[in-house]
Amino acid sequence: MDKLDALLEKILEAVEEKKLTIPVGISNRHIHLKQEDIETLFGKDYQLNKLKDLSQKGQFAAKEVVTICGPKSIIEKVRVLGPARKETQIEVSIGDCLKLGIKGKVKMSGDICETPGITLIGPKGTVVLSKGVIVSQRHIHMDEEDAKRFGVSNGDVVSIKVDGIRGGQYDNTCVRVDKSFTLECHLDTEEANALGIEPNSKIKIMKK
Amino acid sequence: MDKLDALLEKILEAVEEKKLTIPVGISNRHIHLKQEDIETLFGKDYQLNKLKDLSQKGQFAAKEVVTICGPKSIIEKVRVLGPARKETQIEVSIGDCLKLGIKGKVKMSGDICETPGITLIGPKGTVVLSKGVIVSQRHIHMDEEDAKRFGVSNGDVVSIKVDGIRGGQYDNTCVRVDKSFTLECHLDTEEANALGIEPNSKIKIMKK
């Protein structure tokens, strides 16, 4: 029976361990648009068309893409995400910023205060923004039940860890708790690639 | 005198701390070529032309660039580094691999065993490689004196750390000790950007 107990304990440990892993969502560059800018870029009374649902409820990748133009170069076919937001926000990587010729600023989504501007070009018009480009601060979405399980609260800043040949740890990862959220850690492509993270990878929150 | 002692101690601590920081070299995609491939790409008896010296003694960025072609897309103007090596090796990021349509493999420079191939196009010819593309494993170059100071040996695998809004830690960083080496931690652009590292940033080796 000792052997069986030990085996059961190992299985339970593995189950507990699995409960504490978090799936990763890898964000490529994308844009959230306010309705006014949607209409300038795509036409009067234009509504975004859904391409596919995203993991966070109500959010979707739209069929629409725009060109973003910095002082140094442009990036074409940048995906628009829907639905329309209160403010237009462009989320790019630091590599994209270097390419575009703008100084990237790491910010939590929704905070575009003191961020660089950029020019957006759509099929029906151009929007010249004086601000709105962010490099998204890494963050974890979760609902209240998940928060309890992980022992964290909305606004907490945690470190996350991943194993493997490119394994390591990212500090300053914001926890965002809302009953509408689906458990997912959002990293940009550079953050994912630098730790060898792939779409089906899982991360863990480091114990404090 | 107590205050002066405390101040002196703080200054000494800061000096010791500074001694244990390591400058970072950020590697963009590049190619090392063997002489035979140099001649296929650029012409018979061709010699690479130096654009500028690199931090490691004898190594240089050449004026020459080539186009690398994967099954999905191509990347133009990839810098050749000199001098010629025994084997041709292409160092790219995981993002580059996704763009080219090849499966990136993290390897120490010099180890191209079981790596994907690629096609190189130069002004005078094309080289079709069956292997040679690596995603370089992060590593630190240092001489024997540095190794003693950091308490590490050639072949050690350490974790490195950086502070800041994108701060964090990378495990599996190889230590390479040789009397010809200049102290420098080599990261690719994605690794540097993901930790918010810039050309003048310093990293530290984590204590074991």
Image (cartoon, coloured by chain):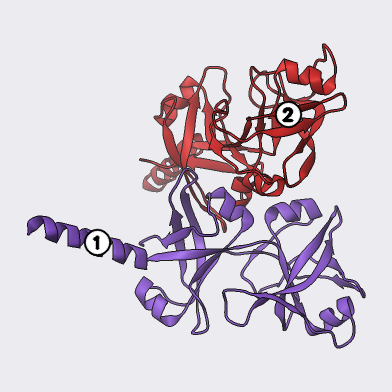
Chain colours: A purple, B red
Q: Secondary structure at mark 2?
A: strand
Amino acid under disc 1? Ile
Judge left or right: residue B155 versus residue B208.
right
- Residues at marks 2 and 1, common chain? no
Residue that badge 1 annotates: A11
Give the residue type at disc 2.
Val
Give the camera-side residue of B191 and A197: A197
Instruction: Tell me the number on the disc at residue B128.
Output: 2
Q: Please tell me in which quadrant of the rendered image residue A132 appears.
A: bottom right
Kindly indicate the quadrant of the structure image that contains residue A116. bottom right
Q: Quadrant of the C terminus of chain A?
A: bottom left
Quadrant into which the N terminus of chain A falls = bottom left
Residue A47 in sight from this viewpoint: yes
Estimate how packed mark 2 is, as few (under 14), some (14 to 19) or many (20 or more) residues with alpha carbons within 10 Å.
few
Residue A111: give its label: none
Please tell me which residue is depicted at 50% across the width and 76% down the height of the picture.
A182
* Residue B195 visible from this viewpoint: no
